[in-house]
Amino acid sequence: MRSFDQVAPALNAIGMASANEDPLDKEALGRELEIEPQGMEMLFDELERVGLAWFEFGEDGKVVFPHLTTAGSQYLVRTATCTGPGAAA
C-alpha cells in the first residue's frame, strides 16, 4: 500500500466527486497529483483492490462516478488522526 501522503489527496478528490455525484477526470487528477497516467491506473486499481474506493468507467476511460467506500472514509480519518498534528511520535 502506498503511503498516506500519496493516497490521501486521491481519496479526498474521490470523496468530493462522489459526494457531489460529479465525474472525476483521472487524467486531470493525475496532473494535479503529478502522477503519470500509468501510475493513476495503478493507484485506482490499488484503491479498489484494498476496498477504499470503486469506480464506474465511461467508454472514454474517464471515471464516470468514483465511489469512496466507508473503509476509504475511515482510512482518511484514522490515518490522519494517527499521523497528524499532536499524534504520538
Image: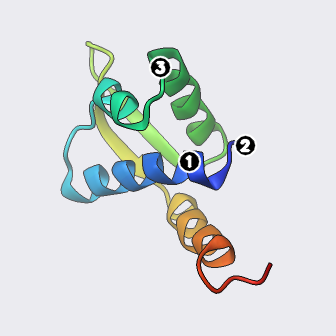
- Is residue 64 in view from this perspective? yes
Q: Counting other residues with Cα less than 10 Å from the Cα at mark 3, is it few (<14), some (14-19), or many (20 or more)? A: few
- Residue 1 is tagged as 2
Identify which amino acid the numbered label 3 is placed on: Glu
Q: In the picture, which quadrant includes the N terminus?
A: top right
- Residue 7 is tagged as 1
Q: CA distance from mark 1 to mark 3?
A: 15 Å
Q: Residue at x 59, y 80 (%)?
A: 85
- Residue 36 is tagged as 3
Q: Quadrant of residue 65?
A: top left
Circles 2 and 1, Cβ within 8 Å, touching? The answer is yes
Q: Position of residue 56 (x, y in %)?
A: 36, 32
Left-right relation of 73 to 84: left
Q: Nearer the viewer, residue 68 or 81?
A: 81
Helix, strand or loop for disc 2: loop
Q: Position of residue 87 (x, y in %)?
A: 69, 82
Helix, strand or loop for disc 3: loop
- Of the numbered discs 1 and 3, the one sitting upstream in the chain is 1
Q: Nearer the viewer, residue 79 or 71?
A: 79
- Residue 56 is tagged as none
- Of the numbered discs 2 and 1, the one sitting upstream in the chain is 2
Q: Counting other residues with Cα less than 10 Å from the Cα at mark 1, is it few (<14), some (14-19), or many (20 or more)? A: some
Q: CA distance from mark 3 to mark 2?
A: 18 Å
Q: Counting other residues with Cα less than 10 Å from the Cα at mark 2, is it few (<14), some (14-19), or many (20 or more)? A: few
* 4 to 30, vertically: above or below: below
Is the image coloured rainbow, by chain, by secondary structure, or in one colour?
Answer: rainbow
Q: Quadrant of residue 50?
A: top right
Residue found at the very far right of the displayed protein: 89
* 19 to 67, vertically: above or below: below
Helix, strand or loop for disc 1: helix
Identify which amino acid the numbered label 1 is placed on: Val
Q: CA distance from mark 2 to mark 1?
A: 9 Å
